[in-house]
Image (tube, rainbow, N blue to C red):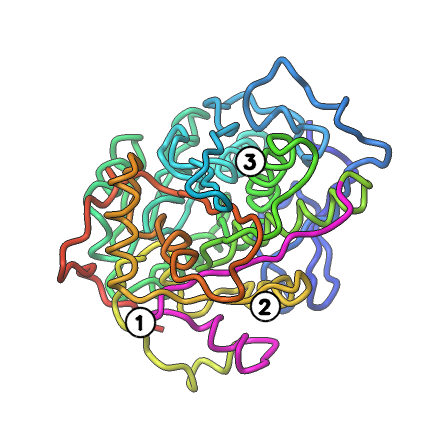
Amino acid sequence: MLADMTIYYCPVDGTRSAITALTWCCPVCRGPWDLEFTPARGIGPNALTTRIDSLWRYKVFLPLDSSAISLGEGRTPLVPLTDTVSAKLDYLMPTLSFKDRGAVMLAELARRLGPDRVVADSTGNAGTSVAAYCARAGLPCTVYVPEGTSAKKTEQIRAHGARLVAVPGGREATALAARAAADEPGVFYASHVFNPYFLHGTKTYVYELWEDLGGRLPDALAVPVGNGTLLLGAALAVAELHALGLIETRPRLLAVQAEAVSPLATAFHAGADDLPPADAATAPAPTLAEGIAIPRPPRARQILAAVRASGGTFLTVPEDGIREAQRDLAARGFYVETTGVACWAAVRQGGKAVRGSVVVPLCGAGLKTGMAGQGGLPRWPVRS
């Protein structure tokens, strides 16, 4: 049963909605929901469910305290890359990407609500995760992707029984198509951007780090940012751990984007609180980091605020840096997709922002995209 104390609310205008409704966005401003949920005071390390070796070990910190459709997601290894940099191997998830952390929350919520069907939109990884967990839950699912999305990702989506819709025009057109479908009656929009349950799933990434590091966090968390779901989940976990008295200092957030598609980095370094109007945005170029090639993330304002509040910054990486980082990780034994190497590429560049202990996520398996060639770029152009 869904917890009575949780409710959707709009961080912009304060509109509220019951979580039992299928309203996927604020009906006033059409912006993403947040969740009115706070872990109970007095929770300590002894509250962890030690017999569970998945992200449900942290159920006391989650708005859903169990899942009937778990695939064993979470609890990924943390391994050193250098004396100061460690990597969290989130590509060792059931569907080979970190998106499983949030997808299990969305699919479990959908299972309890019982919609006629589920829709999602993605550049690949979120779609494969939602498709897999909907298959586990026995829910009909449709996934919208941009034309030219990695063939391995679309193959995986179809393998889980989801209906695949390839949309011409890039990532924004894909999102608009999915949202039009989400407005139809009886549809649950499993949006990793608009539904805050996804963020409460991704926050377990930081809870795992906190436990693995003996009740502390590193000096900095490098996080790839497109729609910002891992970054916002990380910021949420850090705030909760601090409020509960389980950490004293908060890590800096190092937000990483590809140079070719870096609207948030541009806004951050210009001192802006949000992105410019759509008609003033510059059309971005194609990039190997397709998973973070998001020209207008709906939670842009929240992402920028979270990075500033942490004392962190935005870093960008060129295409050659992504290629080299992928080759370097492969030479170290880690086969990671091109988007998933972006943080390692940024940290390898160095600079004064990269100091102290840092953790980078390796977010998706190399099997999803293969190795990037010298001229390899995705076939689909990213358009705003």
Q: Position of residue 172 (x, y in %)?
A: 37, 65
Q: CA distance from mark 2 to mark 1?
A: 22 Å
Q: Secondary structure at mark 1?
A: loop
If you read the primary sequence from the N terminus, does the residue marked by circle 2 or circle 1 appear first?
A: 2
Number of numbered labels in the structure image: 3
Quarter holding the C terminus is: bottom left
Q: Secondary structure at mark 2?
A: helix
If you read the primary sequence from the N terminus, does the residue marked by circle 1 or circle 3 appear first?
A: 3
- Residue at image position (68%, 19%) is 49
Q: Nearer the viewer, mark 2 or mark 3?
A: 2
Mark 1 Cα-neighbour bin, 10 Å: few <14, some 14–19, many ≥20: some
**Amino acid type of disc 1?**
Arg
Give the residue at mark 1.
383
Give the residue at mark 2.
304
* Residue numbers of the magenta segment: 247-274
Q: Nearer the viewer, residue 148 or 265?
A: 265
Queried whether the magenta region covers residue 257, the answer comes back as yes
In the displayed image of the protein, which residue is found farthest to the front?
83
Q: Is residue 141 left or right of residue 34?
A: left
Q: Which mark is residue 105?
A: 3
- Residue at image position (48%, 38%) is 103
In the displayed image of the protein, which residue is found farthest to the right?
42
Q: Nearer the viewer, residue 245 or 276?
A: 245
**Amino acid type of disc 2?**
Leu
- Residue at image position (41%, 67%) is 316
If you read the primary sequence from the N terminus, does the residue marked by circle 2 or circle 3 appear first?
A: 3
Q: Nearer the viewer, mark 2 or mark 1?
A: 2
Residue 168's place in the image compared with 100, above or below, is below
